[in-house]
Image (spheres, rainbow, N blue to C red):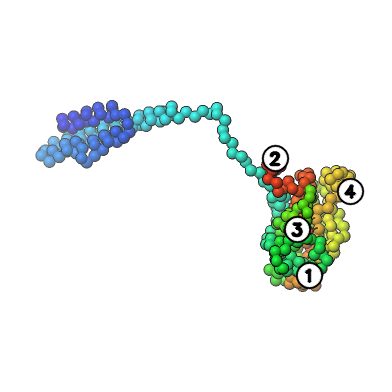
Amino acid sequence: MDELLKIKEEALDKISVCTSLKDLNDLRVFYLGKKGPMQAAMKSMKDMTKEERASFGQVSNKVKQDITKAIEDKKVALEEAEMNEKIKNEKIDITLPSTTLPLGSIHPLSMVREELEDLFIGMGYSVAEGPEVETDHYNFELMNIPAGHPARDMTDTFYINDTLLMRCHTSPVQARTMLKAQGKGPIKIICPGKTYRRDDDDATHSHQFSQCEGLVIDKNITMADLKGTLELFAKKMFGEKREIRLRPSYFPFTEPSVEVDISCHNCDGKGCPMCKYTGWIEVLGAGMVNPKVLEMCGFDPEVYQGFAFGIGLERVAMLKYGIDNIRNFYSDDLRFLNQFTRKD
Ligand code: FA5
């Protein structure tokens, strides 16, 4: 018993002067472990009477508890001291200016594309895609523009070889979608994407630009459906007061074809430099899908009708945000790009 109390005294002394968590752990292993003095003292139990053993057991348990408690208390104290030391040495100067992470902004063309997608998806359309490297067949033939057709001159095309080209409009996606549907309507798609033409770059033209095609095929589709759809597009994109005007035009893939003007949102149709004092701004081409195109793409024109439209995305973005040069879209100029932030 005396031996036990001696061990306890010695342990508590050592614990009280211990200054590191590592040393404290070594003490724990030594005094409470299997090879320590406590365990050695226990060996003498075999020579004791039953009564002696019982009281020896009680004392040894109490000694173990006291040592354990002393170690735990010391551990808490040492950890606290360590933390205080750390806080003292790692002082953070909160008055220092922080390093700000530059926040990106959404490109105005993406903004317009997303707005268009939201608008048409809301009307039950789905978004279709097609390749930018296209075949003559889809880009021209199925759009009723056979080789030698004068309409091929309307768009100066980048050819890769005799049959491959960079699509000059998003209209080939019409043909691809119709053929996939195998003559069964309805179809309601928009197709935003990049397009390429050998146009000379100027303030309003670029050799690479973006269009958004729209195509609806169903039974009993009329020009009134087209007009209603485009009216909604004009009001949603440019404001509730906008009106549209259809002018006769020509596209080989639509019959009849129209150019669509929107009343100028800058001057409310009164006349200003933006609308060249006409009160109207030309925004897109459209028309009823030519029965010949329907037939070539596997639809029976006696049963199905459709309308289509092609919107120039740069055009819409320039009008919407008052951008006077198309080159701004492709310039990487942060002073230009930072002006646009996503609404959400
Ligand atoms: C077409 O490309 C037809 N495929 C549109 C269409 C689709 C009509 C379906 C009927 C039915 P157009 O060549 O007019 O049409 O081009 C459409 C729009 O693309 C133009 O109004 C203009 O905004 C834009 N665009 C054409 N060329 C360029 C260019 N070089 N740079 C920037 N935008 C251009």
Mark 3: secondary structure: loop
Against 188, residue 108 (above or below) is above
What residue does disc 1 label? 147
Q: Residue 166 carries which label?
A: none
Camera-nearest residue between 299 and 320? 320
Indicate the position of residue 208 as horizontal and vertical percent values.
73, 55
Mark 2 belongs to which amino acid?
Arg
Disc 4 to disc 1, C-alpha distance: 37 Å
Point out the image quarter for the C terminus: top right
Mark 1: secondary structure: loop
What residue does disc 2 label? 335
- Mark positioned earlier in the residue sequence (4 or 3): 3
What residue does disc 3 label? 197
Note whether ligand 1 is within 8 Å of mark 3: yes
Against 120, residue 305 (above or below) is below
What residue does disc 4 label? 278
- Mark positioned earlier in the residue sequence (2 or 1): 1
- Mark positioned earlier in the residue sequence (4 or 2): 4
Disc 1 to disc 3, C-alpha distance: 18 Å
Q: In which quarter of the image is ligand 1?
A: bottom right
Mark 2: secondary structure: helix
Q: Residue at x 78, y 60 (%)?
A: 156
